[in-house]
Image (cartoon, helix red, strand yellow):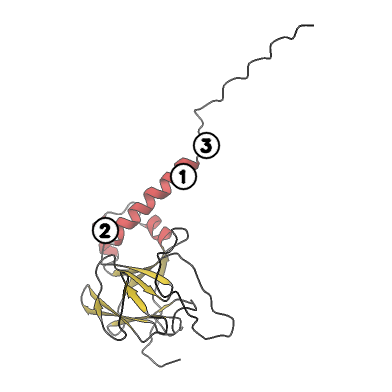
Amino acid sequence: MGSFVGGDPMASLLLSALARMHRSTTPQEFLAAHPCAWLVWEPGTWKPPLPGDGKTIPSLVVPTLPPALGEALAFCLVARDGQVTLGRSPECNIEVNDATLSHLHLLLMEASPGLWTVRDAGSRNGSWMDGVPLPKGQPYVLRNLARLHAGQVCLTFYVPGALYERLAGFRLQTQSRLQFAAPDTKTRLPAVAPAPPTGR
């Protein structure tokens, strides 16, 4: 494991829990409560490391979009010494225990308030932003809804306040599923007509 500047772990929340917390919140109130950029770990195929094995396993050469099923995990980005580290090591601010990640895979830096950059920290399997490979060690500006792939881990970046729209959409989808699953108490099955008498 290479040495690098680590830090405290970054707090995370399930997207569904965050949506419930702010179901009655306005966009302005959400931004006031969370004046931070967000990084969302999207649901997808998880490659857990083998017990006692610290090796990084090869990932797909071309990143693919993750399946829609599963829970997403949201990280409120708070720069520690101007940066946030992401990788498989417990020393990272954002630890993602996926075997396709390097111990230190991505380095996110807050260049100025609200302006973030990302760089591949010399990972084995590489990183992509919106389908374009990231050259190792070079910073690139993160724009709202930028889709990152680190190994086979998929992440989405949101500028401050922008995650609110996704939470609102999540709540609508949840309500639609509940309404679809709820029994219809108004509809009645037609009465069964008595069988006609049979002649002898």
The first of marks 2 and 3 along the sequence is: 2
Q: Depth-wise, is mark 2 or mark 1 nearer the camera?
A: 1
Which residue is identified by label 1? 178
**Real-space Cα distance between discs 1 and 3?**
10 Å
Q: Identify the amino acid type marked 3.
A: Pro
Q: Is residue 193 left or right of residue 136?
A: right
Q: Position of residue 69 (x, y in %)?
A: 47, 58
Q: Identify the amino acid type marked 1.
A: Leu
Tell me the element at label 3. Answer: loop
Q: Is residue 79 left or right of residue 92?
A: left
**Real-space Cα distance between discs 2 and 3?**
35 Å
Q: Position of residue 104 (x, y in %)?
A: 40, 85
Q: Residue at x 36, y 77 (%)?
A: 127
Which residue is identified by label 2? 29
Q: Position of residue 200 (x, y in %)?
A: 80, 6
Q: Residue furthest top?
A: 200
Which residue is identified by label 3? 183
Tell me the element at label 2. Answer: helix
